[in-house]
Amino acid sequence: MEQKPSLLLAACGEEEEPDMSFAGEGDQWEATLEMTEFVSDDDQEMVEHDFAITYQGEEADLLGEDDIGQVVAGYRNVDQETKSTYEFNNESLTDLTFEVSSNLGAFIFDVTADDTIEVYVEWGDRQEETFDITTEE
């Protein structure tokens, strides 16, 4: 009887290391993007995107006197773009980091380790910042 090779994947509550990690900072924000490839239950090649932005200044500088209401942040390369809106009021802000995880088909957001990803952040009264993140060495 011919024995066929097999692959066993096991998870024991440990987080998987990302396949690619990008990081960078602008004047007021820093960002990280971690991408981990996986195969979905229906055999689709997928990529989990873990994106986080952190305000680098003081909380009082970010919030000011008024409720800023939301932070809109996203990232793009030459092929695709994704963005998220983080809604909050000033009283509920417990951290200056905003995070989002999403699973996208591997063909939707094609990224290589050599790519530079552009991050953009909009907040408050028409404030915005754009900067690049690159692969972490």
Image (cartoon, rainbow, N blue to C red):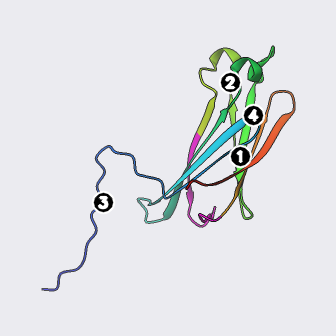
As drawn, 2 above or below 63: below
At label 4, the amino acid type is: Gln
Q: Position of residue 109 (x, y in %)?
A: 63, 61
> Which dot, 4 or 2, sits closer to the camera?
4
State the CA–CA distance, disc 4 to disc 2.
Answer: 19 Å
Q: Is residue 131 left or right of residue 43?
A: right
Q: Amino acid at mark 1?
A: Gly
The amino acid type, in three-letter code, at marker 3 is: Leu
Vertical relation: 96 (above or below) 92: below
The quadrant in which residue 69 appears is: top right
Label 4 to label 1, Cα distance in Å?
Answer: 15 Å
Residue that label 1 marks: 74
Residue position marked by numbered label 4 in the rendering: 28
The chief SS type of the magenta part is loop
Label 4 element class: loop
User: At 49% across and 58% down in the image, what residue appears?
Assistant: 19
The residue range painted magenta reads 100-114
- Look at mark 2 in the image and give the residue it sits on: 88
Q: Earlier in the sequence, mark 4 or mark 3?
A: 3
- The residue that mark 3 highlights is 9
Q: Residues within 10 Å of mark 2 (few under 14, many from 20)?
A: few
Give me the residue at 71% from left, 26% from top. 57
Q: Which residue is painted at 65% across and 42% down in the image? A: 31
Give the mark nearer the N terminus: 4 vs 2: 4
User: Which badge, 1 or 3, comes first in the chain's sequence?
Assistant: 3
Q: Earlier in the sequence, mark 2 or mark 3?
A: 3
User: What's the amino acid at mark 2?
Assistant: Phe
In front of the other: label 1 or label 2? 1
Q: Is residue 85 above or below residue 83?
A: above
